[in-house]
Amino acid sequence: MSSTVFKSLTDTTYDSVEGYRQAGEKADSPQLKQALQQRCQSREQTLQQMNAELQRQGDELVTKGTMTGEAHQMWQSITSAFENDDEAAAERVEEGEDYIKGKFEQALESDQLEAQERAVVQQAYAEICEGERFGDMIAKQFD
């Protein structure tokens, strides 16, 4: 069985994939849409790696979002109805990336991951950092 921390990171990664998907749908700019789709694909690969570890441990794969993620996305859709679509998409991605990076950092600083889980999380963290830099970049672009 996977640790609770690893399972939570996998859940958050799934929510992040969904967040990218929704941001890509919301964006007006073809360039932003394409960039968001590329980041979504990268995040999906990270999710696949994390799900592979869950499978190795005999756990269920993460194939749906969490209640927290769904509530957050619903709130975003309500608040972004009053914003420019590209700006709203950029803001949401930047917020989500800051959140997921912090969660991965906290997990890596803890001693609650098994050795194999830690290796997967460290590998995933590199992609998470790329996403966080991307989020910062697009947020500045649409400020």
Image (spheres, grey):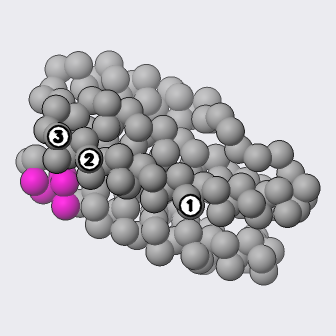
Task: State how far apart marks 1 and 3 are (Cα).
Answer: 25 Å
Relative height, residue 69 to residue 93 (above, below): above
x and y, in percent, of residue 62 in the image? 71, 44
Looking at the picture, tell me which residue is in the foreground, 90 or 45.
45
Q: Is residue 132 magenta?
A: no
Magenta span of residues? 137-141
Observer able to see residue 129: yes
**Circle 1: residue type:** Thr
Looking at the image, residue 41 sits to the left or right of residue 29; the answer is right
1 or 2: mark nearer the eye: 2
The residue that label 3 is drawn on is: 30
Distance Cα–Cα, label 2 vs label 3: 6 Å
Residue under numbered circle 2: 34
In the drawing, what numbered circle is on residue 46? 1
- Say what amino acid the circle numbered 2 marks: Gln
Earlier sequence position, callout 1 versus callout 3? 3
Horizontal and vertical percent position of residue 39:
37, 55
Crowd rating for badge 1 (residues with CA inside 10 Å; few <14, some 14–19, many 20+): many
Q: Residue at x 68, y 39 (%)?
A: 63
Left or right, 27 with reference to 25: left
Is residue 1 positioned above or below 76 on the image? below
